[in-house]
């Protein structure tokens, strides 16, 4: 009796998971825009693997000049060669950028400002997960610095060039931001690190950043949107050492499975689609504006975010003023 009860439950759960998986497969949307990006310059951070790689590949195929901003030279050059070989667009370059170093971010932006004629699109894609309770030489929790604080600095430094083209900024966020928060007293404090929560907090910050930056850029012609790429099997979980979380990922990835190329679709959509030249401060999932509730829309949080960011970065932003 008991065994048949368990067997029955097992069948139902298995069936439900399979049905869910099929439904979610149908949810994967592709960017249908045919926009030609020739003459435009696009910067993709963390472009050597996963979602960033396929975003860069797609934009190169559309004829853009694509700058692969990566922290590791050999990996960056390999990605560049693969993209050139696949697209026959030779206007793809690697430039060094380590988001875990504010010095590197500043050097990268100086280089871009000095050597590039224009910047049309900035894709803030580089991200890390489960690095452990580590601080950078700048004294910031590494996950927070790579996933959010360096984005604040990079975006501010590149904004004059993006404004000149009435360009776009695309931030790779995550649905994980729903379990994240911004607690000024805890955000960089020793002892408050948690693999899942710190990651979620970094994504919460980048989502709040998107909303507030869009407000500040109103009328400038520049749009800024955030994207949830879906649950994608990439290398981002490689650093994870928690077996329980590994199992959760494994199940999640199996149920929601999508490839990095599919995961890049909403990012590409925000870079090229006509819709995103008008839409700003929105969250995109499956190439469409997410209609669900968004917890980061309170103004106080955003004001705090600017203050906290400037304080931790020891940097006064100049281009993201109201
Ligand atoms: N995969 C998912 O299910 C999922 C879901 C929601 C959101 N996202 C977001 O999607 C974005 C891309 O992640 P992914 O899944 O494609 O993972 P990935 O394949 O690991 O790609 C992450 C990229 O960021 C780069 N990166 C890491 N630390 C860096 C640093 N300090 N400086 C410069 N670049 C750095 C990595 O370079 P290396 O190769 O040198 O490590 C890599 O190119 C991330 O922002 C992630 O949070 C992913
Ligand atoms: C993960 O890393 C390996 C080795 O560096 C690379 O060959 C592979 O393409 C990466 N996976 C993705 C999805 O980018
Ligand atoms: C984009 O347009 C240019 C000329 O404007 C053309 O030479 C090129 O072939 C086009 N590229 C794609 C991928 O359609
Ligand atoms: C942010 O900083 C400004 C100026 O330093 C200050 O006037 C304001 O009260 C701060 N806002 C919050 C919410 O802390």
Image (tube, helix red, strand yellow):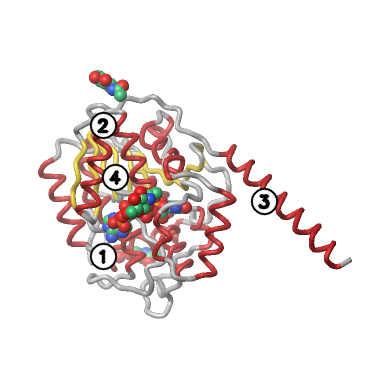
Residue highlighted by disc 2: 64
Horizontal relation, residue 146 to residue 193: left or right: left
Crowding around mark 3 (Cα neighbors within 10 Å: few <14, some 14 to 19, many 20+) is: some
Q: Nearer the viewer, mark 2 or mark 1?
A: 2
The circle on residue 313 is 1
**Residue closest to the eye, 303 or 203:** 203
Real-space Cα separation, disc 2 to disc 1, in angstroms: 32 Å
* Pointers 2 and 3 in contact (C-beta within 8 Å): no
Can residue 92 be seen in this snapshot? yes
The circle on residue 146 is none
**Residue closest to the eye, 120 or 257:** 257
Q: Nearer the viewer, mark 4 or mark 3?
A: 3
**Residue at x 26% of width, y 73% of height:** 139
Q: Secondary structure at mark 2?
A: loop
Of callouts 4 and 1, which one flags the residue occurring earlier in the amino acid sequence?
Answer: 4
Image location (x, y in percent) of residue 59: 31, 34
- Picture quarter with the N terminus: bottom right
The circle on residue 17 is 3
Can residue 212 be seen in this snapshot? no
Horizontal relation, residue 199 to residue 125: left or right: right
The circle on residue 44 is 4
Q: Nearer the viewer, mark 2 or mark 3?
A: 3
Q: Secondary structure at mark 3?
A: helix
């Amino acid at each position: 009796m008991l065994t048949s009860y368990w067997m029955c439950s097992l069948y139902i759960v298995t069936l439900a998971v399979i049905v869910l998986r099929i439904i979610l497969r149908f949810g994967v949307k592709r960017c249908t825009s045919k926009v030609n990006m020739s003459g435009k310059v696009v910067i993709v951070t963390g472009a050597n693997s996963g979602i960033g790689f396929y975003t860069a590949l797609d934009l190169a195929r559309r004829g853009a000049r694509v700058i692969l901003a990566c922290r590791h030279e050999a990996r960056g050059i390999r990605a560049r060669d693969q993209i050139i070989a696949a697209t026959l667009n030779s206007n793809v370059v690697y430039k060094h950028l380590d988001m875990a170093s504010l010095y590197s971010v500043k050097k990268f932006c100086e280089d871009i400002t000095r050597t590039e004629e224009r910047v049309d699109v900035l894709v803030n894609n580089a991200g890390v997960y489960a690095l452990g309770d580590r601080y950078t030489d700048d004294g910031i929790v590494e996950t927070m610095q790579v996933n959010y604080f360096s984005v604040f600095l990079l975006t501010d430094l590149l904004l004059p060039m993006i404004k000149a083209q009435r360009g776009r900024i695309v931030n790779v966020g995550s649905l994980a931001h729903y379990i994240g928060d911004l607690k000024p007293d805890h955000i960089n404090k020793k002892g408050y690190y948690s693999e899942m929560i710190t990651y979620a907090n970094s994504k919460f910050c980048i989502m709040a950043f998107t909303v507030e930056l869009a407000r500040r850029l109103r009328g400038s012609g520049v749009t800024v949107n955030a994207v949830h790429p879906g649950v994608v099997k990439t290398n981002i979980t490689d650093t994870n050492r928690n077996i329980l979380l590994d199992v959760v990922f494994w199940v999640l990835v199996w149920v929601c499975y999508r490839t990095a190329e599919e995961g890049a679709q909403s990012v590409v959509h925000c870079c090229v689609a006509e819709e995103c030249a008008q839409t700003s401060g929105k969250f995109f999932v499956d190439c469409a504006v997410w209609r669900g509730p968004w917890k980061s829309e309170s103004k106080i949080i955003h004001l705090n975010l600017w203050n906290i960011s400037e304080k931790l970065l020891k940097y006064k932003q100049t281009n993201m003023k109201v």
